[in-house]
Image (spheres, helix red, strand yellow):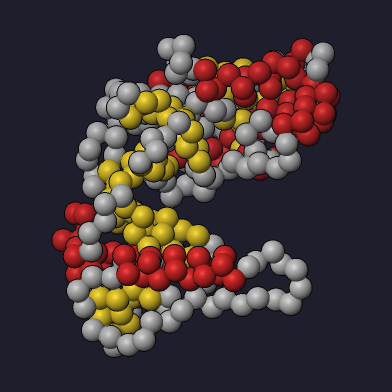
Amino acid sequence: MKRKKPNLKVIDGDTGITNAKLDTVVIAADAQCDRMSVGLFQMTASGLYYNDADEVSGPFEILGRARDPDGGEWARLIRFTDGDGREHRVSVKDADLHSDARTVAATLARHGLKVSPKHRARLLEYLNEIQVDDRATLVKRTGWHRLGDQQVFVLPDAAYGQPDDERVLLNTDVSSPYGSRGTLADWQNTVGRLTAGQRLAVLAVSTAFAGPLLDLVGHDGGGIHSRGSSSTGKTSLARAAASVWGPRTYMRSWRATANGLEGAAVLATDTVLVLDELGVIDSRELNAAVYQLAIGHGKGRARRRVYRVYRVKLTKIRNARSPPELGPRPATSAAPPA
């Protein structure tokens, strides 16, 4: 079977794309196909084929053999694009390659990779047979990690300080709240300028910046709690803190966070967790959530700290003359007539 070349074309006009650059792209694509082919399996630009005829799956690349920082949970780290052109990175555990082929196929298909139902077993055969030299370390939370003698700071889309010969990646199914736009100068001239001289705003923003320092100074998590009547600026404080790490959607509601607290905490380790509307959560749930964040792990976990979080919490007091409550008031019923 003749391999399908990448679909490349030059649009008329000065695009800055030279024939030499196009040749480089084509050569690199061919090299990747050769690297991802083994035995009777051929990886092409249109997919993985067996024996020049059977289409096993859509195209993908194995970035390397992955494992956790302790050298366990070995896996293949796979990269591909879905039907909408979005890139996915999925780790397929080595242990799963010795189980039901439907499980592995379903995992990849859930992320958008086309897998032939008739050739699921061939996909497992290919993944067991292909050899790659590159290595990757998968971590389960953001923030600082020690790999050998190096300190690496991991975010969902980047790792700072990682070794030159190895990728360090966050491995979680929770969607990332982080984001970036503009430049540091843009932020300084907008949020920075508006918060300067405002004590509570400076405190909120400083709390957001303090997250990466926790591990370096040997400090546990902590946080600040702002409460007050409606329309007194509490949400503005939260948005200012959230702007350090992402857009407005970085700020979470207490209700949504209580339902997936550990997932939110592992994505905010060594950064900041911004929580709004404390009053919507039941006081018993709130007490458990605050305790869980403080000790750094959820129920059923060993006593080892899993995450380390700095928090910005906000409460709206419905009646400024009444004492604040943690969570909604319990329902009351009228006493039965005597």
Residue 226 falls in image quadrant: top right
**Is the C terminus in the top left, top right, bottom left or bottom right quadrant?**
top right
**Residue 21 vertical position relative to residue 219 in the rendered view, above or below:** below
Residue that appears at 73% across and 36% down: 183
The reply to whether residue 246 is in sight is yes
Residue that appears at 81% across and 17% down: 196
Location of residue 215 in the rendering, given as x and y in whole percent from the top left corner:
44, 18
Looking at the image, which is closer to me, 196 or 291?
196
Q: Is residue 217 left or right of residue 326?
A: left
Residue at the limit of the structure toward the left, as seen here: 98
Looking at the image, which is closer to me, 257 or 239?
239
**Is the N terminus in the top left, top right, bottom left or bottom right quadrant?**
bottom left
Q: Is residue 103 left or right of residue 282?
A: left
Location of residue 213 in the rendering, given as x and y in whole percent from the top left corner:
52, 18
The reply to whether residue 277 is in sight is no
Location of residue 104 in the rendering, given as x and y in whole percent from the top left corner:
28, 64
